[in-house]
Amino acid sequence: MKTLFAFVVSFGVAYLCLPLCRWLAFRLNILDFPGGRKIHRIATPLLGGAAVYTGLLIAALFNLEKLYFFAPLLLGATLVFIVGLISDVKELSARLRLGCQALIALFIAESGMRISFLPAGPWKHIAETLITIIWIIGVTNAYNYLDGLDGLAAGSAVINLFCFGIILYKTGQYPLGLLALILMGACLGFLPYNFKKSKIFLGEAGSTLLGFTLASVALAGDWAKDDIARISIPVLILGVPIFDMVFTTIMRIWEGKVKTILEWLRYGGRDHFHHYLVDLGFSPVGAVVFIYVLTFSLGLNAVMISNESATRAIVTLCQAAIVFGIIATLMVVGKRRHSGWEKKIKD
């Protein structure tokens, strides 16, 4: 009953806060204006993430006795949310955002939540801390870039959190499972307003909050006894944003669009996974549903290999890599043909 109550509180608070957040966004001119890679046609409020954060915070406060161990995670999420909110109000430079995210990620790593798989040695702590920082920054920004269609980021987060939650409850990790359920409720409270005609967006504050929290939950959970399986499960569950980040990075470097990390952070082209799907003929809703199904499929694979051997984990990762390789090939070839047809029509 307490678990259900926490879910209802996070959902209800987020849902009820959204009209106020929308009003404040218009009042304070915190809006996302159309143009560039954006597909919306009118200025849209950006404070949806504030409602998600409020739902998460209030539900967490009702369960402090169970979640006190994850205080560093909640503090880090708060700091990421604040940085994103400032950027929504007055856009921060890519260098400053990256620096803030790196410091917050370092704080999480030093609090004890880090990737741990390297053999003992003088460089173990430094190497694992560095890998953890890269993981957190990568997933945080991957989720920010995933937020390009209505319902995509928040809906994907719901599926990710659901899959994490199944494993956490199955293995008796109830406090972390409760945290995942609370954030899932807040995301579900936001989703109806993201699909409305009078809609509201997550904003950078909301999308980076989701990415950071998911990356941290992946670090905090004990997913399997074997090191390879333990790493494979979060990679599978978060496979779509990871694929999107890797694929767009490779294509941008290949096409000479970016040369440094800061250029990558600043770049805002229509070259993400969901953009390719729309350009290839999917409707925006169809592209979102396609990504939902793919995300859920990867999550089911992750649930199946929890506490399995390294061999099964490696085979499952290879299978996912093959699927993503096929998707990437079809997207690139399809877009080139589409561009070729457009050129012929113009000629």
Image (cartoon, rainbow, N blue to C red):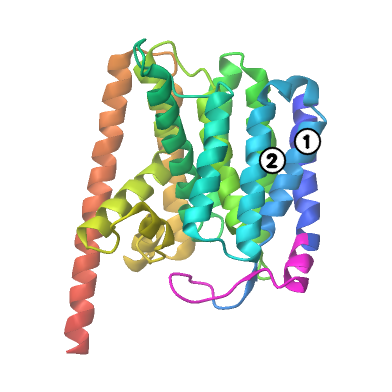
Q: Nearer the viewer, residue 45 or 189?
A: 45
Disc number lying in front (2 or 1): 1
Task: Give the mark nearest the N terminus, 2 or 1.
Answer: 1
The three-letter code of the residue at mark 1 reads Ala
Give coordinates of residue 97: x percent, y percent: 53, 52
Q: Residue visible at 78% across and 62% down? A: 19
Q: Residue visible at 32% across and 55% down? A: 260
Q: Which mark is residue 185?
A: 2
**Do labels 2 and 1 touch, CB within 8 Å?**
yes
Callout 2 secondary element: helix
Q: Nearer the viewer, residue 191 or 247?
A: 247
Q: Is residue 143 visible?
A: no
**Above-or-below relation of 126 to 47:** above
Residue stretch rendered in magenta on the structure: 21-40
**Above-or-below relation of 280 to 183:** below
Toward which corner of the image does residue 338 lie, by quadrant?
bottom left
**Left-right relation of 196 to 326:** right
Q: Which mark is residue 59?
A: 1
Give coordinates of residue 175: x percent, y percent: 68, 21
Q: Residue visible at 43% across and 19% down? A: 125
Give the Cα distance between marks 2 and 1: 10 Å
Q: Nearer the viewer, residue 232 or 342?
A: 232
Q: Residues within 10 Å of mark 1 (few under 14, many from 20)?
A: many
Q: Residue visible at 30% across and 35% down? A: 320
Quadrant occupied by the N terminus: top right
